[in-house]
Image (cartoon, helix red, strand yellow):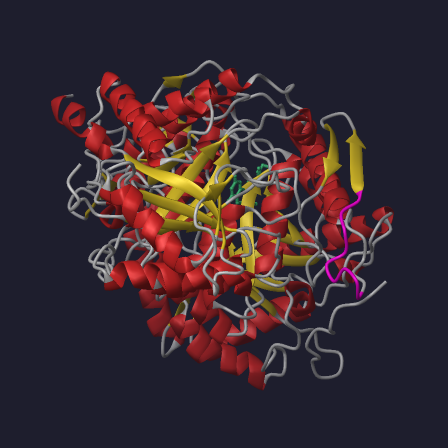
């Protein structure tokens, strides 16, 4: 087994912080109405953000995926950012304008086939000389399936068995070339044959191994099946537990699962998605954060969030007024293409209690309850908090989700990164060239 | 045909498989120095090599003007993903993307996917035409001004300018709309290699650029006229079609005067075969100018047998001579591949419907 270059070394006993950048595209975090917000589509936006992340010595740059425009009440959702370019193509272009930054694409395992996707990922890994990662997602509602040859067709349990077999098959293909020799510096292809429940394929793979062996595998998904899948298969987990307590619980649970799969805790990095707001002082940052929340939750967005929980048309309500007296319709499907928030009656009860306790309007309630900024404060406060999360084993690092495109990472890289470096918990230069080396992950053991 | 019709030149940069970006970047830059309309990159699932569209995405930021046209097969792939990837190549290259629509005919290719058996070319080319059709509809499914960022109403897009495509083909359906907004060229350029009977029909219906095989100008002229007539029969303007003669070129012994002319191709591995030119760069320039002057073709697509050697001679020999004689432009007057080809930006088929509904 060959090992990657060692990760950065922290002062005695201190754990190092890993950082990645999430492109602020299609989500309700993005503040598109800000005058500084530029195109979500133009390549210049991706280039600017990726170069900033590389300047900040981040491990990787992350692109999410959605395969159908979300709908609300049967019509295309029009309030948040809509539309994005295709991830692998963008990342290949970014490989031309970056040198070290890892390049991570979210690609669905349900609406793709192993040979083709393994080849596209291996191509990115080669063209970037060992910087590719694949975030394996499984979402497969019939709604999304209407854009694909097979239609919507897998239930929850099957999604993960297919995903697991998909990843295993991709790894067989990535391993199918012989090792390099002086006579054939890339190795040569050997025939593969895979027979399983979901796939029966054979032939020769067309792409040699990359300098990092094969792409890093990321998993995002929180169910029991999702956690098991991550423990068995993934190199990185993109989680959403962003408080210290929830993070510690998730961290302990996930790391404990590894031994059962013959893996060590260090083999899987846990990186929650995190937002942040900086100010010169903590008070100023809090003020900014409140402003940003109001931009993220417009009056129209507040009503929509309410309708998602209630499952009813509530357009007659005043977003600055009180919550409706009527109860949610638990059977209604009003929003398509979104992960739901759980039992609507329970959510509604929570919202009502909060609204009464704090005297909040509909909009105020939505602002309070939907995704909040994870880290708010002066650069020093934020650096300390990030470090604490990592030292206390709530995370191995973070996938930062800025709210502005494409300048949203500038302040973090300019003001927080130097403080993390001062604390000795963040690299001052890249030690290696591959994503695996940034993450401190060993190169994969070649099977067969 | 008037002799003033602009000459179009393109080159393949594939050849023996290479796995590093630098080789492809160097070849594309070389072709760009010659002001060629576009480079193509062949692809197949059954021979060693990288994904062609990915390679050209990697090349895009390293070049400025040249068109980037990747072979994309439509048989075992998802039409929705294909249309997204081609549109994205157009975004990252700022309007320089195209695709060569191709099919996977062999049992070996089918076994790599395990989803369906190999089918006859006729059925596969019909399906390829459907993929081209649904791709074009998806590219139109966002009107150009769909993104409004209207802070007064809180709307990022105007949903009346986004359209379901509701396509039903023989082998697949797609609901739409696209995830990727309408690309810079409206439609990236669609290229079809019309070597066979079934691909010719798909070309006449869907292609902006058609590659043809002919060993004599009269033969080329006849194919070109036939294609134009078939396009017209589908309600297309024949002048919206660019017909390029495909030529495998070997300029290896081009320093001595060689017998100019065309030989029949040795069947090389993975190559499409077809007319094969061996000789010097000057004679190649004569041949190109002669066919073009006579109106037999709109231009040429050359596939250098040894890219590093032959493309250099095409650019510094053949193209330089054509430029010197004012037969070929010396710079790019426009920025997009459509502009190089003299093709208009397509109107959006949904734009008027959207206004009415
Ligand atoms: C932090 C996070 C990010 C995700 N990003 C995406 C995404 O970009 N695209 C997607 O289709 N699904 C995404 N998902 C959905 C998951 O892949 C998964 O399908 C979903 O969470 C349901 O799986 P579960 O039941 O295991 O949670 C994300 C999930 C999480 C937790």
Whether residue B266 can be seen here: yes
Q: Residue at the bottom extreme?
A: A422
State ligand 1's quadrant.
top right
Whether residue B61 can be seen here: no
Residue depicted at x 12% and y 22%: B356
Q: Position of residue A94 (x, y in %)?
A: 46, 61
Residue depicted at x 74% and y 74%: A6
The quarter of the rendered structure image containing the C terminus of chain B is top left
Q: Residue at the top extreme?
A: B170
State left or right for residue B174 relative to residue A325.
right
- Residue B234's quadrant in the figure? top left
Q: Position of residue B97 (x, y in %)?
A: 36, 47
Residue depicted at x 72% and y 26%: A198
Q: Position of residue B31 (x, y in %)?
A: 39, 60
Q: Nearer the viewer, residue B319 or A377?
A: B319
The quarter of the rendered structure image containing the N terminus of chain B is top left
Residue B77, compared with residue B86, is above or below; it is above
Q: Nearer the viewer, residue B239 or A383?
A: B239
Residue depicted at x 57% and y 16%: B120
Magenta stretch: residue A84 in it?
no
Which residues, given as a range, are shown in magenta? A182-190
Magenta stretch: residue A183 in it?
yes
State left or right for residue A388 relative to residue A75.
right
Q: Nearer the viewer, residue B73 or A263?
A: B73
By secondary structure, the bulk of the magenta-drawn segment is best described as loop
Q: Residue at the left extreme?
A: B356
Q: Nearer the viewer, residue B160 or B91?
A: B91
Q: Position of residue A266 (x, y in %)?
A: 77, 62
All told, the count of numbered labels is 0
């Amino acid at each position: 087994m060959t090992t990657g270059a060692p990760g950065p070394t922290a002062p005695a006993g201190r754990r190092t912080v890993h950082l990645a950048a999430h492109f602020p595209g299609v989500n309700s975090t993005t503040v598109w109405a800000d005058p500084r917000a530029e195109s979500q589509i133009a390549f210049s936006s991706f280039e600017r953000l990726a170069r900033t992340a590389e300047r900040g010595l981040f491990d990787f740059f992350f692109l999410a995926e959605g395969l159908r425009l979300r709908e609300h009440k049967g019509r295309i959702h029009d309030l948040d950012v809509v539309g994005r370019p295709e991830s692998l193509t963008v990342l290949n272009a970014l490989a031309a304008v970056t040198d070290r930054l890892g390049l991570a694409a979210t690609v669905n395992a349900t609406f793709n086939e192993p040979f083709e996707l393994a080849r596209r990922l291996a191509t990115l890994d080669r063209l970037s000389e060992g910087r590719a990662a694949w975030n394996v997602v499984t979402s497969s509602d019939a709604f999304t399936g209407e854009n694909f040859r097979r239609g919507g067709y897998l239930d929850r349990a099957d999604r993960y068995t297919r995903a697991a077999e998909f990843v295993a098959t991709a790894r067989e293909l990535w391993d199918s070339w012989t090792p390099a020799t002086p006579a054939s510096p890339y190795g040569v292809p050997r025939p593969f044959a895979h027979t399983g429940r979901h796939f029966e394929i054979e032939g020769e793979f067309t792409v040699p191994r990359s300098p990092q062996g094969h792409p890093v595998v990321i998993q995002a998904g929180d169910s029991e099946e999702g956690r098991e899948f991550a423990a068995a298969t993934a190199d990185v987990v993109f989680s959403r537990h962003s408080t210290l307590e929830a993070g510690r619980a998730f961290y302990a649970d996930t790391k404990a699962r590894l031994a059962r799969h013959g893996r060590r805790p260090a083999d899987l990095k846990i990186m929650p998605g995190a937002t942040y707001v900086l100010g010169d002082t903590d008070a100023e940052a809090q003020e900014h954060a409140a402003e940003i929340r109001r931009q993220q939750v417009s009056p129209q967005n507040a009503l929509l969030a309410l309708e998602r929980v209630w499952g009813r048309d509530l357009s007659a309500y005043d977003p600055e007024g009180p919550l409706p007296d009527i109860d949610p319709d638990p059977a209604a499907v009003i929003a398509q293409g979104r992960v739901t928030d759980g039992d609507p009656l329970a959510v509604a009860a929570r919202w009502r209690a909060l609204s009464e306790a704090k005297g909040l309007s509909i909009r105020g309630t939505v602002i309070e309850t939907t995704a909040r900024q994870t880290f708010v404060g002066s650069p020093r406060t934020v650096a300390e908090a990030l470090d604490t999360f990592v030292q206390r084993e709530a995370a191995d690092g973070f996938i930062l989700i800025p709210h502005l495109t494409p300048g949203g990472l500038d302040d973090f890289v300019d003001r927080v990164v130097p403080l993390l470096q001062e604390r000795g918990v963040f690299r001052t230069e890249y030690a290696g060239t591959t994503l695996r080396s940034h993450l401190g992950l060993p190169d994969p053991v070649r099977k067969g | 045909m008037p002799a003033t019709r602009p000459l179009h030149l393109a080159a393949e940069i594939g050849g023996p498989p290479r796995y590093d970006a630098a080789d492809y970047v160097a070849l594309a830059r070389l072709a760009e120095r010659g002001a060629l309309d576009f480079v193509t990159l062949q692809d197949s699932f059954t021979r060693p090599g990288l994904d062609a569209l990915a390679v050209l995405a990697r090349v895009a930021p390293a070049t400025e003007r040249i068109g980037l046209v990747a072979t994309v097969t439509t048989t075992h792939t998802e039409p929705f993903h294909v249309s997204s990837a081609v549109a994205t190549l157009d975004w990252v290259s700022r309007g320089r993307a195209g695709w060569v629509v191709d099919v996977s005919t062999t049992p070996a290719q089918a076994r790599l996917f395990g989803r369906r058996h190999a089918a006859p070319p006729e059925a596969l080319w019909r399906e390829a035409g459907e993929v081209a059709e649904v791709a074009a509809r998806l590219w139109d499914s966002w009107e150009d001004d769909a993104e409004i960022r209207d802070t007064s109403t809180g709307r990022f897009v105007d949903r009346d300018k986004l359209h379901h495509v509701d396509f039903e083909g023989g082998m697949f359906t797609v609901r739409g709309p696209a995830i990727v907004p309408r690309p810079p060229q409206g439609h990236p350029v669609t290229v079809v290699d019309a070597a066979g009977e079934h691909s010719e029909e798909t070309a006449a219906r869907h292609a902006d650029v058609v590659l043809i095989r002919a060993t004599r100008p009269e033969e080329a002229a006849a194919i070109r006229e036939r294609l134009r007539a078939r396009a017209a029969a589908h309600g297309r303007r024949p002048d919206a079609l660019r017909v390029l003669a495909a030529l495998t070129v070997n300029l290896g012994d081009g320093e001595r005067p060689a017998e100019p002319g065309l030989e029949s191709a040795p069947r090389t591995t993975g190559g499409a075969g077809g007319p094969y030119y061996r000789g010097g760069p000057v004679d190649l320039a004569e041949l190109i100018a002669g066919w073009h002057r006579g109106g037999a073709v709109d231009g040429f697509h050359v596939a250098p047998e040894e890219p590093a050697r032959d493309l250099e001679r095409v650019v510094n020999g053949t193209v330089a001579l054509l430029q010197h004689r004012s037969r070929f432009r010396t710079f790019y007057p426009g920025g997009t591949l459509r502009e190089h080809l003299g093709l208009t930006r397509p109107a959006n088929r949904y734009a008027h419907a959207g206004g009415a509904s």
